[in-house]
Image (cartoon, coloured by chain):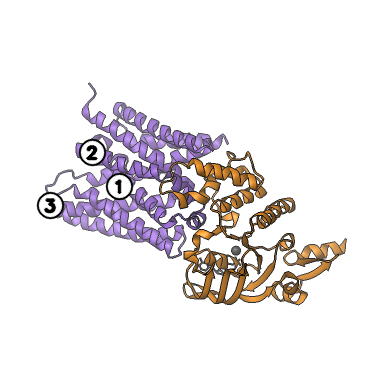
């Protein structure tokens, strides 16, 4: 029999792969790698803050919710700054530096709270946000991931063409009757929301790579949007699943394996160009 | 047909309170083509974007077909400068063209409706790109790209076309190619056009009015009235000039060095 935690890990991988497989080409085409980076760092801030609240209120399920809320506030802030005329990079830069400072501060607070409570469960939780703990996914986590994932998936699918047009020519889109700002906001919230949904399975450190490289690789391999999506989905799925299986046998953290595999594929493709 | 497509009176356009254009008064009659000239940073793009309701920080009067720009949006097609397009997105010519109408027709755009595809084929044919529907936009030549953008602009049957430097970054033969399509649009569809350009010469044939700006209005009128040597020099510097060769007007602005080289030969 396959142990239940492996089944959960496989289901989680499938959900993660479908979401990132679809999102990753957009991140590349729209040039959002820097934004993705900042978003994922705000997830860490949100998680630490959530843990502080979680410990004080003795409800650790707050972690995910707080992380999600903080991240969405951050992406909305970035989008608002862009509306004000800042370039995407400066908007991200300004917000990201605040977030980085706040993260360090919140760690200080977290340690104080932790010290005041000698007994609490899941003490290594914050580390699991950094490295991903796909084998420790609870049924609850999985449920959130799947339900949230389905919502995100359909939003992304329905608006995929709009996101392509938004990336291609935002002013044109606006002048032909589309609402560029709304699409941009939805896209940013999707990046943040999907990040929050999957951060515990993939881990912050590698989320960046898994969210960017499959799309970058797919864009190198094809110019047909359907093929690009296919390659990106297939690649993410293959890498995620094989890393779970490999990790099961070797004991090496799966997200580390996934990242290295993607890095190797990207490197090989680049060098063969 | 005395209606004005665009009417501006004492129009000042600002960015964050700072004026980029000051006190413009002009009008463009329906069906006419206006060429908008001015050095870099003169505010040409700003003026087009304001007319297109893409920028709304302005004071003074600005009417498009008698209404404020945001109310006339459906009558306007704006064609941004092609270098502002992100070609990492592998869209086909058809997909780019379809963008011109689907936002006015339907709420969801996951699939391009058949009616829009048919229309896209028709306008691609009109700009001389029949059969190119499935070619990737980014793999087309500069002239073809510009024609695809013109096709996109025609999708919504607009009455006013705003074109931002449709000829820049094109080689001379592509300029002729695009100018031919512009002249066809004027002839067969009777659209009002405002075209910004650095190289006015290929466009003089279709230009009914010329407006020279440099943050403020310098000259506005018929080409032969505006393009006088002294006016051109005052905007583009001492090397610029307007000349008449065999009854045809030519304007030498940014390319003054070529003129000098010719003399040396
Ligand atoms: N988004 C913006 N924010 C602030 N200033 C701008 C913006 N866009 C243009 N400007 C300024 O407005 C002036 C006119 O620019 P623009 O309309 O692009 O000129 P042109 O198209 O004639 O080269 C320039 O001084 C430019 O710096
Ligand atoms: Mg310009």
Q: Where is residue A244 in the image (x, y as percent from the top left)?
A: 32, 31
Residue picked out by circle 1: A196
Residue picked out by circle 3: A117
Residue drawn 29% across the image and 44% down it: A197
Residue picked out by circle 2: A143
Q: Do labels 3 and 2 share a chain?
A: yes
Instruction: Give the mark nearest the N terminus, 1 or 3.
Output: 3
Q: How far apart are the alpha carbons under marks 1 and 3?
A: 27 Å
**Mark 3: secondary structure:** loop
Extreme-top residue of the structure: A1
Quadrant of the frame with the C terminus of chain B: bottom right
Task: Report whether residue B90 is seen.
Answer: no
Q: Where is residue A53 in the image (x, y as percent from the top left)?
A: 18, 54
- Chain A is shown in which shade? purple
Chain to which the residue tagged by mark 2 belongs: A
Instruction: Give the mark nearest the N terminus, 3 or 2.
Output: 3
**Mark 2: secondary structure:** helix
Residue drawn 49% across the image and 69% down it: B68
- Chain B is shown in which shade? orange
Chain to which the residue tagged by mark 1 belongs: A
């Amino acid at each position: 029999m396959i142990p239940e935690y492996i089944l959960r890990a496989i289901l989680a991988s499938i959900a993660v792969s479908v979401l990132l497989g679809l999102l990753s080409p957009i991140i590349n085409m729209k040039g959002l790698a820097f934004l993705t980076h900042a978003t994922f760092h705000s997830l860490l801030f949100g998680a630490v803050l959530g843990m502080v609240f979680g410990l004080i209120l003795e409800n650790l399920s707050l972690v995910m919710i707080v992380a999600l809320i903080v991240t969405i506030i951050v992406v909305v802030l970035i989008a608002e700054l862009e509306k004000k005329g800042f370039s995407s990079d400066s908007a991200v830069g300004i917000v990201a530096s605040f977030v980085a400072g706040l993260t360090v501060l919140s760690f200080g607070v977290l340690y104080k709270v932790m010290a005041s409570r000698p007994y609490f469960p899941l003490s290594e939780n914050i580390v699991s946000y950094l490295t991903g703990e796909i084998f420790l996914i609870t049924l609850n986590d999985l449920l959130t991931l799947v339900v949230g994932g389905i919502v995100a998936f359909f939003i992304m699918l329905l608006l995929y063409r709009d996101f392509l047009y938004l990336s291609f020519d935002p002013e044109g889109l606006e002048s032909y009757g589309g609402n560029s700002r709304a699409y941009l906001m939805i896209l940013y919230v999707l990046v943040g929301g999907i990040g929050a949904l999957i951060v515990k399975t993939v881990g912050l450190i590698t989320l960046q790579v898994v969210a960017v490289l499959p799309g970058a690789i797919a864009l190198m391999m094809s110019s047909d949007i359907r093929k690009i999506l296919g390659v990106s989905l297939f690649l993410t799925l293959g890498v995620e699943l094989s890393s779970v299986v490999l990790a099961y046998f070797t004991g090496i953290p799966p997200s580390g394996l996934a990242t290295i595999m993607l890095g190797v594929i990207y490197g090989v493709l680049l060098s063969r160009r | 047909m005395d209606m004005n497509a665009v009417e501006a009176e004492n129009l000042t356009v600002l960015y964050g309170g700072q004026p980029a254009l000051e006190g413009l008064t002009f009008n463009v009659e329906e069906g006419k083509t206006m060429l908008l000239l001015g050095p870099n940073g003169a505010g040409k793009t700003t003026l087009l974007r304001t007319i297109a309701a893409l920028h709304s920080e302005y004071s003074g009067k600005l009417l498009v077909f008698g209404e404020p720009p945001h109310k006339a949006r459906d009558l306007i097609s704006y064609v941004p400068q092609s270098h502002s397009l992100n070609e990492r997105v592998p869209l086909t010519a058809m997909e780019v063209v379809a963008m011109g109408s689907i936002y006015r027709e339907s709420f969801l755009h996951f699939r391009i409706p058949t009616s829009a595809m048919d229309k896209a084929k028709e306008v691609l044919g009109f700009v001389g790109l029949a059969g190119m529907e499935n070619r990737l936009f980014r793999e087309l030549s500069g002239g073809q790209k510009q024609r695809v953008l013109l096709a996109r602009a025609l999708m919504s049957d607009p009455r006013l076309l705003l074109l931002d430097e449709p000829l820049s970054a094109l080689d001379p033969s592509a300029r002729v190619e695009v100018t031919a399509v512009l002249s066809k649009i004027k002839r067969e569809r009777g659209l009002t056009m405002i075209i910004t350009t650095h190289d006015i010469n290929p466009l003089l044939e279709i230009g009914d009015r010329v407006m020279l700006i440099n943050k403020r209005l310098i000259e506005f009128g018929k080409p032969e009235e505006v393009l006088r040597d002294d006016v051109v020099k005052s905007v583009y510097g001492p090397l610029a000039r307007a000349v008449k060769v065999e009854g045809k007007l030519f304007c030498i602005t940014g390319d003054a060095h070529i003129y000098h080289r010719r003399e040396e030969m």
